[in-house]
Image (cartoon, rainbow, N blue to C red):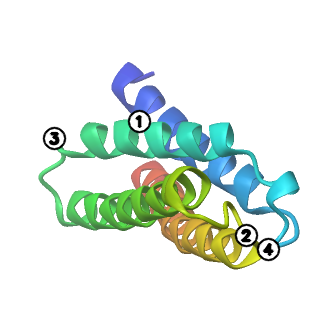
Amino acid sequence: MNLEKVVFGFFITLAAALNFGFFVGEIDNPTVHNGVELAAALVASLVATVLKFGDRTQLGAIHLATSLVADLQLLVAAAVWVWASQMSASGMSEAHMSVVVSLSGGALLANIVSVVLMVSEIIQVRR
């Protein structure tokens, strides 16, 4: 068993799972979306991105691209969350939460693509 692949798979799957946990729920209801879970998804996604830097294959480049997309989406979502809750006069509104959850959904799509690529790579190696 390759420990590097285990850690890599763990963080890819963790990022997707945390992002999914944040994403699920009414899109405009701030009470069903936890900011700590969004932060955890961002950290896991950033760690997964760092782990992808060593792979020099074409599939590795696509893995890195999907991770960068997820990171960008989650960073912007976190920035909107902080701005809305800390700097906006109206506080976290339904419109702000819709933007945050939508951005998280884009990151979730990128994470799903990354997980599918990882699984396809595993299947390809087995053959």
Q: CA distance from mark 4 to mark 1?
A: 30 Å
Amino acid tagged 2: Ser
Q: Is residue 5 above or below residue 85?
A: above
**Discs 2, 1 touching: Cβ within 8 Å:** no
Disc 3 from disc 1: Cα separation: 11 Å
- Callout 1: SS: helix
Q: Earlier in the sequence, mark 2 or mark 1?
A: 1
| Residue behind mark 1 | 8
Image point (50%, 56%), residue name:
87
Q: Circles 4 and 3: CB distance less than 8 Å?
A: no
| Residue count near mark 2 (Cα–Cα under 10 Å), binned few <14, some 14–19, many ≥20 | some
Q: Residue at x 19, y 66 (%)?
A: 58
The reply, left or right, for residue 116 in relation to residue 49 is right
Tell me which amino acid carries mark 3: Gly
Quadrant of the snapshot with the N terminus: top left
Q: Do callouts 4 and 1 mark residues in contact (Cβ within 8 Å)?
A: no
- On the image, the x and y values in percent for residue 23 come to 73, 62
Against 94, residue 57 (above or below) is above
Task: Give neighbour class at mark 3: few <14, some 14-19, many 20+ (Cα, 10 Å).
Answer: few
Depth order, front residue of 122/9: 9
The tag earlier along the polypeptide, 3 or 2, is 3
* Residue beneath disc 2: 93
Question: Total of numbered circles in the picture?
Answer: 4
Which secondary structure lies at badge 2? loop
Disc 4 marks which amino acid?
A: Ile
The residue identified by callout 4 is: 27
Question: What residue is pinned by disc 3?
Answer: 54
Residue 59 drawn above or below residue 50: below
